[in-house]
Image (spheres, helix red, strand yellow):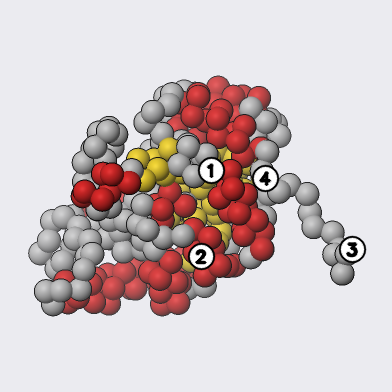
């Protein structure tokens, strides 16, 4: 396994400055945003698509520091009912797939998106319960008319470019848990898989270790991010918490850097289960801990994960 970072956390600094910082911190890989929600402060997508010399120079900045690119990330909502918003997100997604192919990066990370409840909608409608029956009607319409047609086409586009798409299972979008991830993969294409982020599973009451078992070879990329559940606030309001992320004292849960939501025992089990199902790729630190600075949250994650990562290749089972 290798350790990396999602560079969106350092979008206020130059590309070269962040790369130096990542290298000096002892990491192996970077995940780079290409637009939509993560933004593209470190990746001039149009310039890189149009110029082979620009691609060579840009890629050399990464590789000359002994780093690799684990994925290009363009999390967005190309299914948004606002056609202009959806088209902009779609164009970024397509360009990201094309750029990944030209750079030799095999994984593009995305959100599945969420449509509205009809063609007349202006905002997404995330269905969270089956009754009254209107909600199941909406959900069936979304999958049949929007989700499956769109992602079937994008699966083919990505396959034609030798790229696979890794979806972050995120509430608010149609793929938010293991079940919906596997459904999308079954309905739309085997080159669609998961960017496994345990933080989004924790607050839904899921066990990331069970998710790893279920997903298996469909895990294409992993985010290292933690989540702390506040038992008192959760007992009072449940986990469907819409208070601002900055309201840490009253929220049912908040994102934490690894080790501050769940202890070392969990994270040891996490990397072990990943290896058990055959994942030996990058753990990409995503720092969204509102109680720590950019530097402190990142460095604590690095120190924590370096001690538990399984780096060496497996040998033969010498004891049996």
Give the foreground label among 4 and 3.
3
* Residue in the image at 13% along x and 56% along y: 122
Residue 59 seen by the camera: no
Q: Earlier in the sequence, mark 2 or mark 4?
A: 2
Nearer-the-camera pick, 7 or 36: 7
Give the foreground label among 2 and 1.
1
Q: Secondary structure beneath disc 1?
A: loop
Question: Do callouts 4 and 3 mark residues in contact (Cβ within 8 Å)?
Answer: no
Residue that label 3 marks: 318
* Residue in the image at 15% along x and 74% along y: 131
Residue that label 1 marks: 263
Mark 2 to mark 1 CA distance (whole Å): 17 Å
Q: Secondary structure beneath disc 3?
A: loop
Mark 4 to mark 3 CA distance (whole Å): 22 Å
Nearer-the-camera pick, 18 or 157: 18
Nearer-the-camera pick, 301 or 231: 231
Mark 2 to mark 3 CA distance (whole Å): 28 Å
Q: Position of residue 238 (x, y in %)?
A: 24, 53
Counting other residues with Cα less than 10 Å from the Cα at mark 4, is it few (<14), some (14-19), or many (20 or more)?
Answer: some
Residue that label 4 marks: 309
Q: Position of residue 165 (x, y in %)?
A: 49, 60
Give the foreground label among 4 and 1.
1
Question: Do callouts 4 and 1 mark residues in contact (Cβ within 8 Å)?
Answer: no
């Amino acid at each position: 396994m290798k350790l990396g970072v999602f560079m969106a956390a350092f979008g206020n600094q130059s590309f070269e400055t962040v790369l130096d910082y990542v290298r000096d911190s002892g990491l192996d890989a970077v995940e780079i945003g290409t637009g939509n929600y993560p933004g593209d402060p470190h990746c001039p997508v149009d310039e890189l698509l149009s110029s082979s010399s620009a691609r060579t120079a840009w890629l050399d900045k990464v590789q000359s520091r002994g780093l690799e690119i684990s994925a290009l990330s363009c999390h967005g909502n190309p299914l948004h009912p606002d056609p202009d918003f959806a088209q902009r997100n779609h164009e970024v997604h397509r360009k990201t797939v094309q750029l990944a192919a030209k750079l030799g990066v095999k994984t593009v990370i995305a959100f599945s998106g969420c449509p509205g409840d009809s063609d007349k909608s202006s905002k997404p409608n995330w269905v969270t319960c089956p009754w009254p029956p209107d909600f199941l009607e909406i959900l069936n319409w979304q999958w049949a008319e929007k989700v499956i047609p769109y992602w079937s086409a994008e699966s083919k586009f990505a396959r034609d470019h030798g790229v696979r798409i890794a979806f972050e299972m995120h509430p608010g979008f149609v793929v938010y848990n293991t079940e919906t991830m596997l459904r999308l993969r079954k309905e739309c294409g085997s080159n669609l898989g998961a960017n496994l982020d345990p933080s989004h599973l924790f607050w839904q009451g899921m066990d990331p270790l069970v998710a790893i078992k279920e997903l298996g070879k469909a895990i294409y990329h992993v985010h290292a991010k933690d989540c702390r559940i506040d038992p008192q606030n959760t007992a009072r309001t449940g986990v469907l918490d819409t208070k601002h992320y900055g309201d840490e004292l009253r929220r049912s849960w908040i994102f934490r850097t690894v080790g501050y939501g769940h202890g070392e025992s969990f994270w040891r089990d996490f990397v072990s289960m990943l290896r058990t199902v055959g994942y030996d790729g990058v753990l990409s630190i995503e720092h969204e801990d509102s109680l720590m600075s950019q530097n402190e949250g990142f460095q604590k994650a690095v120190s924590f994960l370096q001690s538990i990562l399984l780096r060496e290749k497996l040998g033969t089972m010498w004891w049996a």
